[in-house]
Image (spheres, rainbow, N blue to C red):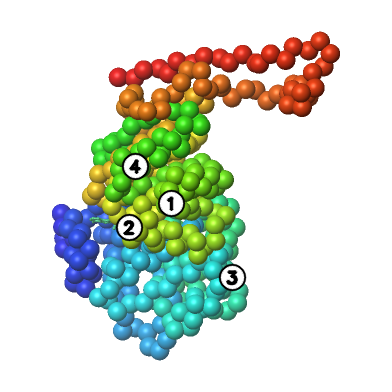
Amino acid sequence: MIFKDLNIIEPILKALQEEGYTHPTPIQEQAIPILINRKDLLGCAQTGTGKTAAFTIPILQHLYNSKGDSKGKRKIKSLIVTPTRELAIQINESITSYGKYTGLKNVVIFGGVKQGGQTDALRRGTDILVATPGRLLDLISQGFISLQDIKYFVLDEADQMLDMGFIHDIKKIIAKLPFKRQSLFFSATMPPAIAELSSTILKEHERITIKPKQATAEKVEQAVYFVSKPNKTKLLIHLIEENPEASILVFSRTKHGADKIVRLLTKAHIKSAAIHGNKSQGARQRALGNFKKGELNILIATDIAARGIDVEELSLVINYDLPNIPETYVHRIGRTGRAKASGIALSFCNQEEKAYLKDIQKLINQQIPLVEEHPFPLDENEEVPLAPKPSKNQRKKSKRRAEHKPKEGENMSKPKRKKYYPRKRG
Ligand code: AMP
């Protein structure tokens, strides 16, 4: 099937051709006819499947076909709500590309930056608004936005919205929408709370499920390194030096960890930047922009900040820490090996993380090949397992040790270390 077979109008087909899209992805093939027929849609799919084009193309087409309907200042007729600022910016960029020959206007608004530029754009009028929930409600309450002309509403990454605590904001937004509208609801997972939320938004609807698993298994080459915690940075530097041209997205479980990696890389004269929730919006956008343009090769990200980020030509994903939620691994490695490109995902695993690795392998139903030959193999004496939380008494003892104050008759010998032997994998 090609895009023309989906009854897409010429101005959009031309833009898609310029983007280099020849064939629709499975979600596009299934969703576009449903949406062109003005039905509501529940899409169980994550980024990387081509879902942005799947929902923006029909919206652009409807708006283009009814362009003559309204006169005067453009009213917001389509609202797309998404959890993160990065994703909002990315969706807006996609609309600009796919809609470049339609004459339609789109604006993006998100928090963490001054509102002046955004309210100026809104004053000039727009057909499509892409927004994060907080800033949207803020600008509605200030009278800059009215939702009364909305005909197409998209709630993107609903499960992420719930995780980030946006559920009340979403309910407030839904309450302001006109009853007569077409609604689209996307979520990577469908736990009961999400299914319930979808039922409050959608009327009679169609459902599409796109499984990301095959994409992971087929397109992304994966490998795991057993390495001690203190040696992870050395191994990272080694891999960066071995791949000087590569665009590398490094995942850290924590914000603090991400900053620390940047500091250690800077010491080794390697330029990198971190994106996470504690960084200002300006710093996040700058880092991401430079990474996308290829001016910055190494980006360190936490899971929330990276979710939905779409970087063309991303050649390598490195899991500096393994995630404790196995689905997160799938999200992470889905950053590489996008629509057409094939990618590589390398994971660092220390002794404590071996249980996480086991869960991940179970979820993806495959053994991740182990790299046995590398300069920093996990030394059997190097790591001790996570000890159970010390008791009050033990804490006192270790304090005395640290202060060199042995209790009378107390033995100050070093605690014994346990030995570990990494399991070999074929
Ligand atoms: P998304 O899931 O919307 O984030 O899209 C993932 C990536 O696939 C983006 O880089 C899109 O530009 C790209 N893409 C979307 N649809 C197609 C298509 N039909 N052919 C080639 N690339 C596509």
Please say if the residues under marks 2 and 1 sit with CB atoms less than 8 Å apart: no
Reply above or below: 124 against 195: below
Q: Residue at x 49, y 77 (%)?
A: 117
SS of the residue under disc 2:
loop
419 and 305: which one is in front?
419
Reply above or below: 228 against 183: above
Tell me if residue 188 can be seen: no
Q: Residue at x 41, y 38 (%)?
A: 236
Give the label, 4 or 1, closer to the camera: 4
Name the kind of residue labelled 2 in the image: Gly
Cα separation, mark 4 vs mark 2, equals 17 Å
Task: Identify the residue position indicated by label 4 in the image.
Answer: 241
Tell me if residue 247 can be seen: yes
The tag on residue 138 is 3
Earlier-in-chain disc, 2 versus 1: 1
Q: Classify the position of the C terminus by image quarter.
A: top left
Reply above or below: 127 against 378: below
Task: Identify the residue position indicated by label 1 in the image.
Answer: 272
Cα separation, mark 3 vs mark 1, equals 34 Å
221 and 176: which one is in front?
221
Please say if the residues under marks 4 and 3 sit with CB atoms less than 8 Å apart: no
